[in-house]
Amino acid sequence: MKNLSKLSVLLFVALFVAMGVGTAMGASKFPEKPVTIIVHASAGGGSDIFARTMASAVEKNKLLPKPLVVENKPGGSGAIAFAYVAGKKKDPYFMLTAVTSFLTTPLMGKAPVGLKDFTPIANFAFDEYMLMVNPKSKYKSVKEIIADAKANPKKITVGGTQLGSSDSICAYLVEKAAGVQFNYVVFNGGGEVNAALLGGHIDIAVSNPGEALELFKAGKVKLLGVYSDKRLAGAPDVPTMKEQGVNVTYVQNRGLVAPADIPADARNVLVETCAKYMKTDVFKKYLVDNMLSDAWMDSETFQKWLEKENERYAMVLKDMGLIKKK
C-alpha cells in the first residue's frame, strides 16, 4: 500500500509538473514581435502623423514589449490598405488607420471589403471640419454664402478632393440643410484645393481644423464656420454652422482597426495599450497641435459607433447619387 501510495504521489507530481510546463510552453505573451500599423494614406498626411506619433509614444513610454511599426499603403481612397489588412484575417500583428474613408470607400463599391472584415480596436479623436474662404472674399459669413447660393444656384464653387470625401459630404450637408446647390470642383489633393482657394479660383473650401487653423494663423484664409456643436477652443471667434442657421455637424474620426477574428486576448492588449497611450503627454500635445477633440471609444463602443455611422453614410451617399439605389 505504501509503495502504491508513493507511486500515486509521484504520478500526481509528474502530471502537475507536466501540465505546468505544457502551459508555459503553449502560452504566448502578445506581442512577441512588432505590430504593424498600416496607414491608408501617404506619408505626411493626418493619418500618417497620427500613426507615427502613437508609435513613437508607445516605444518611449514602453507601453508594449515590442514596437509599433508604421507602413504606408496609399491608393484607391484607402482600398489598397483596406484589402491588405483584411487579408490578414486572425492575425493580431496588423492594425489599420480608420477615418471616414474606411466606411465610404467600401460603400461606394471601391473596395472589395467592408466593416465585417475588421475588428475595431479603438477610436481616439474627432476632427471638426471648418468652412473657409480667401481673405479677399466678398463673403463675411455663412449666411451670406447661403443667400447668394439661393439667388444663384450652382454659381458658388466649392473645392474638394473627390466625390464621397469628407469635404464633399460637408458641402452636401450644407446644400441639403439650406436648400441650395453648389458647384463642386474636384482636385487631386488637399494641397491643390488650398492653392485654388488662395489663388481665387474657387469660392469656398472645407478643411479639417489642423490644416484650416494653420492657414488661418498665417493669414492665408478666413474661417467662416465650424461643423461642430460648439465653438472650438483654438478658434473661439469662429461661429458654428448651427449658430448661422445651418443645422449641420460633421466630424471625422481617428481610430484603429485590426483584421477580423483576431484572438480576444490580443485584442484586449491592443485596446489597453491604446487607452494607456491616450493618457500620455504625447497624445495630449497631439490633440492640441492638431486641434482635435478627445473621443475615446474602446473596441465594443467603437464597433457600435462604426455600425451606426456606416448606416448614416449609406443614406448620405445614396442621396448624393454615389451609391446606386436598389
Image: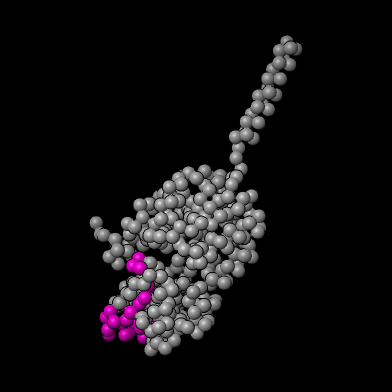
Q: With respect to residue 7, does 44 lie above or below?
A: below
Tell me residue 63's x, y (percent). 63, 54
Q: What residue appears at the point 57 percent right and 60 percent down from the top-left corner? A: 54
Image quadrant for the N terminus? top right
200 vs 58, nearest the viewer: 200
Tell me residue 230's x, y (percent). 49, 75
Tell me residue 322's x, y (percent). 29, 63
Q: Which residue is most to the right?
A: 2
215 vs 294, nearest the viewer: 215
Tell whether 223 sits left or right of 31. left
Q: What residue appears at the point 74 percent right and 12 percent down from the top-left corner? A: 3
Q: Is residue 147 magenta?
A: yes
Image quadrant for the C terminus? bottom left
Q: Residue 180 falls in which quadrant of the image?
A: bottom left
Q: What residue appears at the point 27 percent right and 65 percent down from the top-left corner? A: 321
Q: Residue 185 falls in which quadrant of the image?
A: bottom left
Tell me residue 12's x, y (percent). 68, 22
Q: Which residue is most to the left?
A: 326
Does residue 183 appear anywhere in the picture?
Answer: yes
Tell whether 189 sits left or right of 237. left
Q: With respect to residue 10, does 129 lie above or below?
A: below
Q: What residue appears at the point 66 percent right and 31 percent down from the top-left corner? A: 20
Q: With respect to residue 303, does 249 lie above or below?
A: below
Q: Is residue 266 magenta?
A: no
What is the basis of the colouring in this image? Answer: one colour
Q: Which residue is most to the top?
A: 1
What's drawn in magenta, residue-wise?
142-164
